[in-house]
Image (cartoon, grey):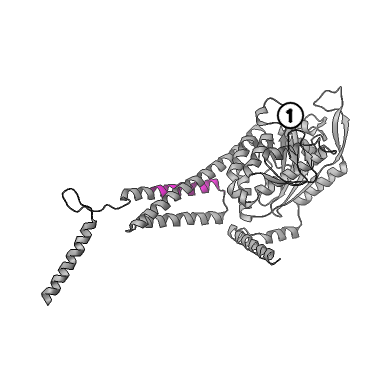
Amino acid sequence: MKKKKDRKINLSNTETKAKREKKMPVDKHGRVMKRRAFPRKPVYIIAILLMAVAAIVFLGMMIIANLLPSDLTIIVSVIVVVLLMLTCFMLSSRYRWKRIVGIVIGLIFVLVLASVTGFMKSTYATMNQISAAGISAEGPHAKSVDVTGEAFNIYITGIDQWEEEKGYDLERSDVNMIVTVNPVTKKVLLTSIPRDSYVKLHTAQAMDKLTHTGVYGVDETLNTVEDWLGVDLNYYVKMNFTAVRDIINAMGGIRVYSPVEFDSSLRPYHYKKGWNDLGGRQALFFARERHAFEGQDAIRVENQQRVMKAIIKKMTSSTTLLTSYDDVMAAAGKNLSTNMSSGDMTELVKMQITDLAEWDIQSQKITGEYGEDYVASLSQKNKYSVYYTDAASVKKCVDAIQALQNPSVREKEEALKSTSKSFVINYLNMVANKIKEGKEDTDN
């Protein structure tokens, strides 16, 4: 009985061995060949090295560019390190399928980090390019403040020419707007100044149209407006038609409200009464139109404010910041200059990413009436159409700027309560509010 049992066990072992050997590959001499591991060891060693290099470069660029809030930077860093460790674990596994999955994850890991690193590098370079162009070529120097804790004024000067016309035509300041920003109360005030405003030039001390100050450079425009209004202009942004068109296109267009229906006198564009979804070129000619209105330049100033409001709203939305920010910066880098430092621009971006706040955008304009008078930059033999600004209107606008810059203690306290300095907390609050709004809509 024992012999029979041993014989059965031996037969069973022989069969099992035969089965195993049958599955194993053999060479031409019939000898069993050993299976080679897949992927081969050098492959996953190279994969680990590539991932490590990509992670180091990414983390280094993230620190240099400094585009993300501190808590978000920590979260991203932890995620990168955890993914790196997880992939290394899978690549060192004895199981073939885990090593293959590890290779796939590793490739995705490297590609994603490379693209994000490229995005941060180009954004950082563009910010420096925009700032350097404004500081070196134009002047004057910025009156810098803590842009995340103090109110400041940005002067927008829009030049009436396309990029290809640069150097062949005079750079008149066609759009003149003071953007007052209070980062604490999350309020913005747009103050529009008619292009033909009759003002005293800073250098020549002679009367001229405000638009003509652009011919002498943006420093003359800023100094003239500061002399006139008595308001500090901390920064300026200078852009031409091409910049406006390209920036709006990079955002994916904007949504602008028109109180009346009209056609552009410059291009075959029609604008309906109500909301209009506009591309860059359509938005530009919406803001430029004046002959279609009885009020002419006064209506154009209001439309310029509508376009600027739409740009600010679109740019400060979380969707645009995450999906189109690189494209917007690339578009701005070609035809826009400012004396705001790249560091200040970065701080504003980080603040918006952290707060995820909706800004309260208000607007006003300096009013007056048209007349005729002599202008310093043109022949003194003739009088030209100028805009006499109303002193009461000027005072009202200046008072509103100062009021927004100097909010009450109560306003500051309420604003600080509404947001946290943590991106995570603000993000969770935003999600909770969205869910709450969705439930309320369902109940109604």
Residue name at image x 59 percent, y 37 percent? 129
Image coordinates for residue 221, horizontal then vertical, percent: 75, 35
Residue name at image x 69 percent, y 25 percent? 168
- In this view, the residue farthest toward the bottom is 1
The vertical placement of 439 against 352, above or below, is below
Quadrant showing the C terminus = bottom right
Label the magenta part by its dominant secondary structure: helix
> Is residue 58 magenta-colored?
yes
Image coordinates for residue 79, horizontal then vertical, percent: 48, 56
Quadrant position of residue 373: top right
The vertical placement of 18 against 368, above or below, is below
Residue name at image x 69 percent, y 52 percent? 183
Quadrant position of residue 88: bottom left
Q: Does residue 103 appear to the left or right of 79 in the view shown? A: left
Q: Does residue 402 appear to the left or right of 55 in the view shown? A: right
Residue stretch in magenta: 49-67
Front residue of 93 and 194: 93
Quadrant position of residue 343: top right
Quadrant showing the N terminus = bottom left
Asked whether residue 324 appears in the rendered view, the answer is yes
- Local packing at callout 1 (Cα closer than 10 Å; few below 14, some 14-19, many 20+) is some
- Residue tagged by mark 1? 215
Front residue of 264 and 54: 264
Q: For numbered disc 1, what is the local secondary structure?
A: helix
> Is residue 65 magenta-colored?
yes
Front residue of 311 and 438: 438
Image coordinates for residue 185, horizontal then vertical, percent: 71, 55
Image coordinates for residue 289, horizontal then vertical, percent: 77, 37
Asked whether residue 231 appears in the rendered view, the answer is no
Amino acid beneath label 1: Val
Q: How many marks?
A: 1
